[in-house]
């Protein structure tokens, strides 16, 4: 196991150009798919074992199968492509769009055909300006060649694709927040059910998939679902693009066969910890998942192994943390992010994330009592499972894990009345953004003693 | 703004809105366009968007205020955004931000007195493996170290 290029094969070619992409088999899968029955495509995706690459890891074929059959629909179906990538640590969809924009387009067309949708929307993170230009140009080229729009490849299948640019809101990556935003509203998540497959965009049946999930579609169709399923390990088929960052020598995106060990990624491929420092911890799936300690470095990067280790594969973002990092400061910085990004719709998340930040700040500054450490965990517990969308959990889970796994470090802050790193932690300063939203984030509010 | 400018923004918004099954979906692209025209979103920009889409200016304000990229206050000619989220912070984002503060003479969140540069600290920009990530007018510079900052500021002052 280890590096395995499927998406990132042919790295030497400029695959942003349609002609180059076609030379390496591009749009063959689309031609093939348009000659198949829709149900047969769903079956291939089911057989492939492909699971969502956006965070939750839901089986892609099952999700597509949840949409009502065409004859039972009263409204048109839509495909939405989640290209809002903003989970801290994650930068893989950006490189996928930079390098293989046509795979994203081709996969989207296959998925649209699979569910009988004639319109697809790519919700693209607003900050990704260069990636927007690449996707727009690729789309234009595909359109000019009859691959997008009316009567695609003369088959009678029509499908338009519109790129919708976001404007800076992490919560719009959450699927129902994304739909609200795409409908021209504030991007606040909706209660589920109804699920988007039944009532999504404009209250119509909607399939939402991540960029990387859809970029894998052409490979599944070309190889056949069963052969794709042979890559990787049980319940974790195929390859994933992992984003490696933090205190590591060679940060970057690496496409690996699922089941490769964290050690192989961090040490063999990533070159290990920078400047000879000792490994302290690894966040294996973006800032919202529980942390792993250095002792857990042999955990394989697959869904089941991560679950057994008490964490998650999440968005595939592996953040390496060396021994200079204060875990209270890490908790505070992570909590600040989720407080900032909470949409404010439900109380446990809106208020709970603020409490977390305020208690963590007291602990870091050595002003917290023993009871407040318990209060922090209590707040986390009251958030977990009590929110409308998973953002609340995404704040509580990692912070609770830092306390569980690095309890003595938290305890020392209380016992010693300050940070044991004495201002030398790699995260010192903790500069969280202040922006136009600061007006309604009251800084300095304290949890009652 | 001349009447013809206003007509053209109006027309551009109509074209964009027509791409969607429901016109209201055009509000985010319309706000992006209006911001491009004005540099930020003053009340008249919100009014123009509202007129073009048949919604109220208050509704436009409510939508715009949800998203970090819409500026409801004037900003500088150039926008410098320094990522201070975990991966970048682990490799020295604080030092980079402080260097910008020193070179520009403003704090994060402020604009230089001459109106040239607005400096912001931002959440994860999506380039974590190449930190510290700095976006200058939405073009990413990766990685930026504290010692690279003076040259970037000079480049902006010279431009
Ligand atoms: C707070 C939050 C943020 C999310 N951000 C993203 C994102 O940026 N990109 C993404 O693909 N999925 C994101 N997700 C997951 C989506 O809700 C959804 O599960 C995913 O897009 C489904 O696609 P997939 O099945 O192909 O993974 C986020 C979820 C939550 C709760
Ligand atoms: S959990 Fe947080 S982000 Fe999600 S809906 Fe509730 S307040 Fe909004
Ligand atoms: S943490 Fe800085 S770009 Fe992601």
Image (cartoon, coloured by chain):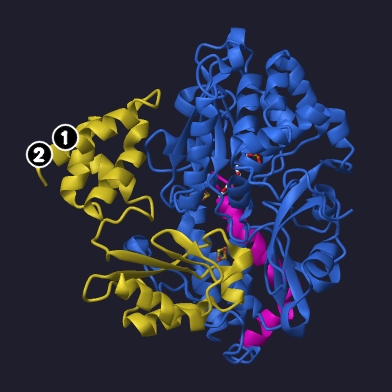
Chain colours: A blue, B yellow
Mark 2 CB within 8 Å of ligand 1: no
Chain designation of label 1: B
Q: Secondary structure at mark 1?
A: helix
Can residue A180 be seen here? The reply is: no
Span of residues in magenta: A387-414
Q: Is residue A227 left or right of residue B2?
A: right
Locate residue A142, reporting x and y percent.
55, 29
Determine the residue positioned at 48% across, 32% down: A140
Nearest to the observer: residue A257 or residue A106: A106
Determine the residue positioned at 82% across, 59% down: A309
Locate residue A263, reporting x and y percent.
84, 66
Q: Secondary structure at mark 2?
A: helix
Locate residue B153, reporting x and y percent.
37, 77
Chain designation of label 2: B
Question: Does residue A310 lie above or below A239 as drawn?
Answer: below
Q: Which residue is mark 1?
A: B7
Determine the residue positioned at 32% across, 69% down: B118
**Label 2 crowd bin: few (<14), some (14–19), many (20+), radius 10 Å:** few
Question: Does residue A59 lie above or below A432 as drawn?
Answer: above
**Label 1 crowd bin: few (<14), some (14–19), many (20+), radius 10 Å:** few
Indicate which disc residue A200 carries: none
Residue A32, picture quadrant: top right
Residue B24, picture quadrant: top left
Residue at far left of view: B3
Locate residue B55, reporting x and y percent.
24, 33
- Residue B131 magenta: no
Indicate which disc residue B3 carries: 2
Question: Does residue A395 lie above or below B12 as drawn?
Answer: below
Kindly indicate whether the residue at mark 1 contacts the one at mark 2 (C-beta within 8 angstroms): yes
């Amino acid at each position: 196991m280890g590096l395995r290029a499927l998406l990132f094969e042919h790295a030497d070619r400029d695959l942003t150009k349609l002609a180059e992409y076609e030379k390496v088999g591009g749009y063959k899968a689309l031609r093939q798919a348009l000659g198949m029955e829709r149900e047969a495509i769903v079956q291939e995706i089911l057989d492939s074992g492909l699971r969502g690459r956006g965070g939750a890891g839901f089986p892609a074929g099952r999700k597509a199968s949840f949409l009502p059959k065409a004859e039972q629909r009263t409204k048109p179906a839509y495909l939405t492509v989640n290209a809002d990538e903003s989970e801290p640590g994650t930068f893989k969809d950006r490189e996928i769009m930079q390098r293989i924009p046509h795979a994203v387009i081709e996969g989207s067309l296959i998925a649209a055909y699979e569910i009988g949708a004639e319109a697809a929307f790519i919700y693209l993170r607003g900050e990704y300006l260069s990636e927007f230009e690449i996707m727009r140009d690729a789309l234009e080229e595909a359109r000019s060649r009859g691959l997008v729009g009316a009567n695609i490849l003369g088959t009678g299948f029509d499908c338009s694709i519109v790129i919708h640019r976001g404007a800076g809101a992490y919560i719009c990556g959450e699927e129902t927040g994304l739909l609200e935003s795409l409908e021209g509203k504030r991007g606040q998540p909706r209660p589920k059910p109804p699920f988007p497959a039944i009532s999504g965009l404009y209250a119509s049946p909607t399939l939402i998939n991540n960029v990387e999930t859809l970029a894998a579609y052409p490979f599944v169709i070309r190889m056949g679902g069963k052969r794709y399923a042979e890559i990787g390990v049980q319940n974790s088929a195929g390859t994933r693009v992992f984003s490696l960052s933090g205190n590591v020598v060679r940060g970057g995106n690496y496409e690996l066969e699922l089941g490769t060990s964290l050690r192989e990624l961090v040490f063999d491929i990533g070159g290990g910890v920078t400047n000879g420092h000792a490994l302290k911890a690894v966040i294996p799936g973006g800032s919202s998942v529980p942390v792993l300690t250095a002792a857990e470095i042999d955990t394989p990067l697959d869904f089941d192994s991560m679950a057994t280790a008490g964490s998650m594969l999440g968005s595939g973002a592996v953040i390496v943390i060396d021994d200079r990092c204060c875990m209270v400061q890490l908790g505070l910085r992570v909590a600040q992010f989720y407080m900032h990004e909470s949409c404010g719709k439900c109380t446990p998340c809106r208020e709970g994330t603020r409490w977390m930040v305020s208690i963590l700040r007291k602990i870091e500054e050595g002003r917290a009592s023993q009871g407040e450490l318990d209060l922090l965990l209590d707040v986390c517990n009251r958030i977990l499972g009590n929110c409308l969308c998973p953002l609340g959990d995404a704040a509580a889970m990692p912070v609770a894990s830092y306390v569980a796994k690095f309890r003595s470090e938290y305890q020392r802050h209380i016992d010693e009345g300050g940070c044991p790193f004495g201002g030398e932690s790699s995260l010192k300063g903790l500069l969280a953004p202040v922006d136009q939203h600061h007006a309604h984030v009251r800084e300095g509010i304290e949890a009652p003693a | 703004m001349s009447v013809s400018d206003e007509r053209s923004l109006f027309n551009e918004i109509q074209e964009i809105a027509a791409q969607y099954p429901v016109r209201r979906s055009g509000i985010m692209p319309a706000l992006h366009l209006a911001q491009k025209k004005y540099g930020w979103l003053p009340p008249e920009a919100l009014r123009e968007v509202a007129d073009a889409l048949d919604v109220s200016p208050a509704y436009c304000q409510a939508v715009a205020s949800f998203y970090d990229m819409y500026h409801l206050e004037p900003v500088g000619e150039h926008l410098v955004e320094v990522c201070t989220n975990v991966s970048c912070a682990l490799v020295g984002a604080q030092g980079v931000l402080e260097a910008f503060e020193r070179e520009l003479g403003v704090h994060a969140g402020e604009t230089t007195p001459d109106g040239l540069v607005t400096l912001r600290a931002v959440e994860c920009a999506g380039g974590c493996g190449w930190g510290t990530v700095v976006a200058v007018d939405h073009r990413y510079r990766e990685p930026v170290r504290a010692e690279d900052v003076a040259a970037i500021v000079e480049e902006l002052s010279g431009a």
